[in-house]
């Protein structure tokens, strides 16, 4: 099997503190253009439960070198998992057609190196530049992967802003599996609405909706001009997160499948 390697340049870790909504705004001024975002959050107790119930899961999910780095530590395993998930989300494929061990993460002083089979990527994707933000707080690990392309002739310097929203459901709403699931869905919706209103006013936002492309990748769609903005969502064990970029990645040529219409000022 042939592989491509993409370097994810690390930024400083983002540590959320306090109760309620956590929000971080990330800026980058560059010639490069944002292509996509991939976001994943993972509660540490999830890995602790899996290790107790099915210890062999570690060997199924992680490569030998990843296990050598992480050992049996739940925090390190969760960090590796969130990077794998976030990376495949940024590619727009998820793990479709891939085994978990096909994606391998190694760390360096400059960030992380992700090895991915070539058949899971397009020729263009193999040339993307990557950036990673690792975040979390006690009991949670998260990763945000940003993929960038080189500028096309005529494109100049551009400032890209990316907002990352993290929310946690009250314990009272997570007493049952169904209650936790419903709370996570509501929190994801709230996080998206909050992130979007950081950049768009009622007058300038236009009619906005969450849509999915055929491969399942979500985007924020602006009806007035057909612009598609990068978006990624994740939830786990009562946590929910959303990330959104303020620069459109392309204009719509084919109508994707609508998933969920949102109102800009609802649920904030």
Image (cartoon, rainbow, N blue to C red):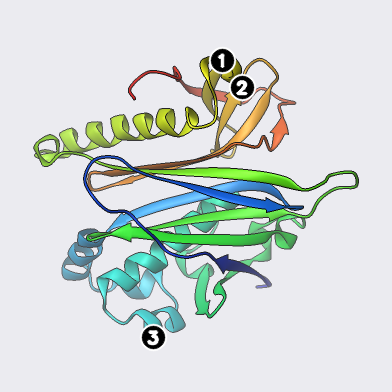
Note whether residue 140 is visible: yes
Badge 1 vs badge 2, beta-carbon distance below 8 Å: yes
Residue located 36% across and 53% down the image: 41
Q: How far apart are marks 1 and 2 (CA)?
A: 6 Å
Pointer 1: what residue?
207
**Eyeballing the image, is 32 above or below 48?**
above
Pointer 3: what residue?
68
> How many badges with numbers are in the image?
3
Q: What element carries label 1?
A: loop
Q: For the residue carrying disc 2, how many other residues have a C-alpha within 10 Å: few (<14), some (14-19), or many (20+)? A: many
Q: For the residue carrying disc 1, how many other residues have a C-alpha within 10 Å: few (<14), some (14-19), or many (20+)? A: some
| Quarter of the C terminus within the rendering | top left
Q: How far apart are marks 3 and 1 (CA)?
A: 49 Å
Pointer 2: what residue?
222
Earlier-in-chain disc, 1 versus 2 = 1
Is 11 placed left or right of 140 in the picture? right
| Quarter of the N terminus within the rendering | bottom right
Q: Which of these two is toward me, 211 or 17?
A: 17
């Amino acid at each position: 099997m042939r592989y491509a390697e993409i370097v994810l340049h690390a930024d400083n870790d983002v540590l959320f503190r306090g109760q309620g909504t956590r929000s971080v705004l990330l800026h980058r001024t560059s010639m490069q253009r944002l292509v996509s975002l991939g976001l994943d959050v993972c509660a540490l107790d999830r890995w602790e439960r899996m290790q107790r119930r099915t210890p062999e899961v570690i060997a199924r999910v992680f490569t030998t070198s990843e296990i050598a780095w992480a050992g049996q530590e739940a925090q390190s395993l969760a960090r590796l998992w969130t990077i794998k998930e976030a990376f495949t989300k940024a590619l727009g494929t998820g793990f479709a057609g891939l085994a978990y061990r096909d994606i391998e993460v190694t760390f360096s002083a400059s960030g992380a190196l992700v090895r991915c089979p070539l058949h899971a990527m397009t020729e263009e994707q193999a040339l993307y530049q990557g950036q990673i933000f690792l975040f979390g707080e006690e009991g949670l690990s998260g990763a945000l992967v940003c993929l960038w392309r080189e500028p096309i002739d005529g494109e100049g310097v551009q400032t890209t802003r990316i907002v990352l929203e993290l929310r946690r459901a009250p314990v009272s709403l997570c007493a049952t599996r169904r209650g936790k699931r419903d709370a996570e869905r509501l929190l994801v919706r709230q996080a998206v609405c909050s992130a979007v209103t950081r950049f768009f006013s009622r007058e300038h936002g236009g009619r906005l909706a969450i849509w999915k492309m055929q491969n399942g990748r979500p985007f924020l769609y602006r009806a007035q001009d057909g612009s598609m903005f990068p978006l990624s969502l994740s939830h786990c064990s009562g946590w929910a997160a959303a990330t959104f970029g303020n620069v459109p990645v392309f204009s719509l040529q084919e109508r994707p499948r609508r998933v969920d219409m949102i109102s800009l000022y609802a649920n904030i």
